[in-house]
Amino acid sequence: MQQPSAHPSISSISSLLAACLCLVASASAPAQSLLELTEQALAHDAQQQSQHQAVVAALQRVRQARAGLLPQVGLQAGSQYSDSRLHLPSPLPNSHLRARQDHLAVQASQPLYRPVLRLAHAQSQQALAVQQAQQQASQQTLLLQTAQAYVGLLLAQDGLRVQRALEQAVQEQAELAQRNFALGLTTITDSREAQAQLDSVRAQALALEYELQSQQLLLQTLTGQHSPIKAWSLPDDAPLPPPDTLLQAQQDWLDSLAAHHPQLQQAQAALEAARLETRKAQAAHRPTVDLQASYAQQRNPDGSLSQPHKHHSQVGSVGVQLQVPLFAGYALQAREQEALALEEKAHSDYLDAQRKLSLALRQSLLQLQSSWQQAQALDSALASSRTAWQANQTGYAVGVRINADVLQAQANYHRTHYAWTQARYQNLLAQLQTRHAAGRLSLQDVAGISQQLRAEAGKRFDF
């Protein structure tokens, strides 16, 4: 049977060199904080620009709806040439006139009673509120997405570091087992177990390299950067603040969801717009009253049939016009029923959004508390697994432990260390997720998390 090689293969060496070059390139670049990358993402994101233009367009629609309540003034002018023939019974003579007519008129109107126009103006304001709420929700989502990508990059970096440290430790254990076998102190089984563990660790490292490249690509896409990004890290000795403050604010946040959460504000504005649409449908049955005024001048340089001499006239008028809808083929009644149905739908959508957002906030608070407790528990487990690893190393040296015990202790320690690191990062992310679930996430909150990270975290992964 072919013996497993104690040396890494050429493909493994190539993968290791590629990963080292990637890490060196990343290390040569200055580390960037979460706050810096978030600001870049806000400036680069096309969705934010789209939402801004949507708000601008909605504001112009408000002005258009308001214009329907203001006076409308128009100017008319023209000139025409006419050929008129007047045929009269005998013995009266017929008349024939070729003449030019010039006219100029100014017309103005002012709505006095048009409830549909006032309701349409109020409805356009609700549409503006919907767009503003969508913009705010999109911004908060981008803040959270950038933080998630940043934490994902940190986890990928730390995971690869843990795996490389485990690979080095397993390789040293494999070399030790090989030397002991050469001296006749152990069997070939120890050497083969160590080599098998080393191959497995290297395979996992390749998967983590791909995860690191994927997270780099995601963060570069969000920020618009093209070079590798080096993220700040959370120092091992940095304490995690307990979630007591956020947990105490749970009831206040639940009670004020409608006032702060942009998704609920959007649903509320949509409901108000639906109610206004119902009122518009009902107002279509009402009469309308407009004030109308005009002033016109007409010039006849060639005269007219009634007045053959050159002349001109001036006419001014002012009055009130009343229009009353009588029958429209039941279209108004059908439109009113449609509006009522859409209003009920909007109300149901609002209640559904309120329940879902309330549940999401409660779940986020539980996740925040769970991640903090898990980080505290893994802190104790990390110390215990390190002690167990050292004890197995000592036992292997004196012959009371076998190589498989040491390898298992090594793997347990590194897995525990990575799980501990992951729980700490998840706790930082859970703080932002909780504020996002409450509709209160802001750039200032991201800056607070960014301050807990450092460009140079000092000694990390003390294996």
Image (tube, rainbow, N blue to C red):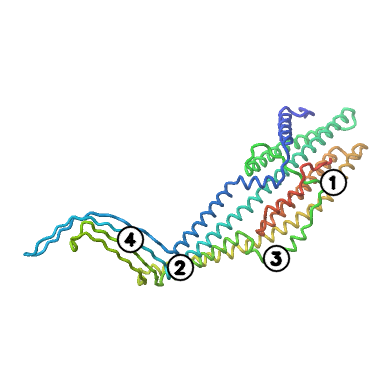
Identify residue type, mark 1.
Ser
In this picture, is 331 found above or below 425? below
Left or right position of 304 against 263: left
Q: Residue at x 41, y 71 (%)?
A: 285
Q: Is residue 83 left or right of residue 28?
A: left
Mark linked to residue 20 = none
Q: Earlier in the sequence, mark 4 or mark 1?
A: 4
Contact, mark 3 vs mark 1 (Cβ under 8 Å): no
Where is residue 412, by image quadrant? top right
Which residue sits at x=45%, y=64%?
70
- Mark-to-mark CA distance, 4 and 2: 34 Å
Q: Badge 1: few (under 14), some or many (20 or more) residues near its Cα, within 10 Å?
A: many
Q: Earlier in the sequence, mark 3 or mark 1?
A: 3
Near mark 3 (Cα within 10 A), the count class, few <14, some 14-19 or many ≥20, is few
Number of the front mark, 4 or 3: 4
Q: Which residue is mark 3?
A: 252
Q: Is residue 11 visible?
A: yes
Question: Residue 438: which quarter of the image?
Answer: bottom right
Residue 121 rendering spot, x and y as whole percentages: 49, 64
- Rounded to the nearest angstrom, the CA distance separating label 4 from label 3 is 63 Å
Where's residue 435, x and y in %? 69, 57
**Three-letter residue code for mark 2:** Lys
Q: Is residue 37 left or right of residue 184?
A: left
Q: In the drawing, what numbered circle is on residue 105?
A: 4
* Contact check, label 4 and label 3, Cβ < 8 Å: no
CB within 8 Å, label 4 to label 1: no
Question: Mark 3 against mark 2, which lies toward the viewer?
Answer: 2
Among the 4 quarters of the image, the one containing residue 356: bottom right
Quadrant including the N terminus: top right
